[in-house]
Image: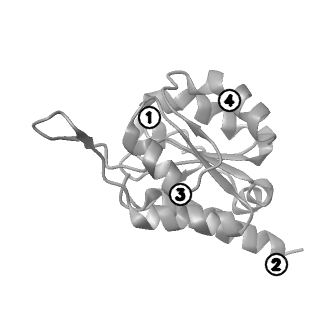
Amino acid sequence: MNKLSREELRKRAKCIRLVLTDNDGVLTDTGVYYSDKGEEFKRFSIRDGMGVERLRKVGVQTVIITGENSGSVKKRAEKLQLPFLYLGIKDKLAQLETILRETGYKPHELAYIGDDSNDLKIITEINKEGITACPSDAMEFVQEVVHYICTKPGGNGAFRDFAEMIISLKKEESEGE
């Protein structure tokens, strides 16, 4: 794990204004369900949704960035009132410049949570100035490079765990001023 001291995590958390999250494996449990008509279903955690809301209350927005182009992800983003949604993104690092331009945020204001090989490049970039995390059931090679491994698996509260960590660190930093 790419460990940062608690003090460094607090300093970085103070600046976080945008959390980027992968969808499959973070907001979902990696399962995809198909009906006999070929309809795709994904399960989302209500607790993760509350994490989005709690972050919003402390001035942190959430954005989904995913390689999928799924209607269920679009509906979930609408339900959560996310300001931006990036679907069908195969190269997340290449999309980062667009995200920064469209949102107006700077690299040190970002956090990222992902779980697999398609997240590694953006995790490595955000590690430089922001905070990164992965669900407890993320691929081992992702666990080795993030700052924080959540106590919960993807689709079962991992995003909420990361959100609460950021909120807690922000609170610690503001109390220390």
Q: Is residue 72 above or below residue 66?
A: below
Q: Is residue 105 above or below residue 124?
A: below
Can you tell which of label 1 and label 2 is closer to the viewer? 2
Q: Secondary structure at mark 4?
A: helix
The image shows residue 115 at horizontal and vertical percentages of 44, 40
**The quadrant where residue 52 appears:** bottom right
At label 3, the amino acid type is Leu
At label 4, the amino acid type is Leu
- On residue 80, the disc is 3
In the rendered image, which residue does mark 1 sit on? 141
Q: Tag 3: Cα neighbours inside 10 Å, few (<14), some, or many (≥20)? A: some
Q: Tag 4: Cα neighbours inside 10 Å, few (<14), some, or many (≥20)? A: some
The image shows residue 169 at horizontal and vertical percentages of 70, 67
In the rendered image, which residue does mark 2 sit on? 175
Nearer the N terminus, badge 1 or badge 3?
A: 3
Structural distance between the alpha carbons of marks 3 and 4: 22 Å
The image shows residue 161 at horizontal and vertical percentages of 50, 63
In the rendered image, which residue does mark 4 sit on? 96
At label 1, the amino acid type is Phe
Labels 2 & 4 near each other (Cβ < 8 A): no
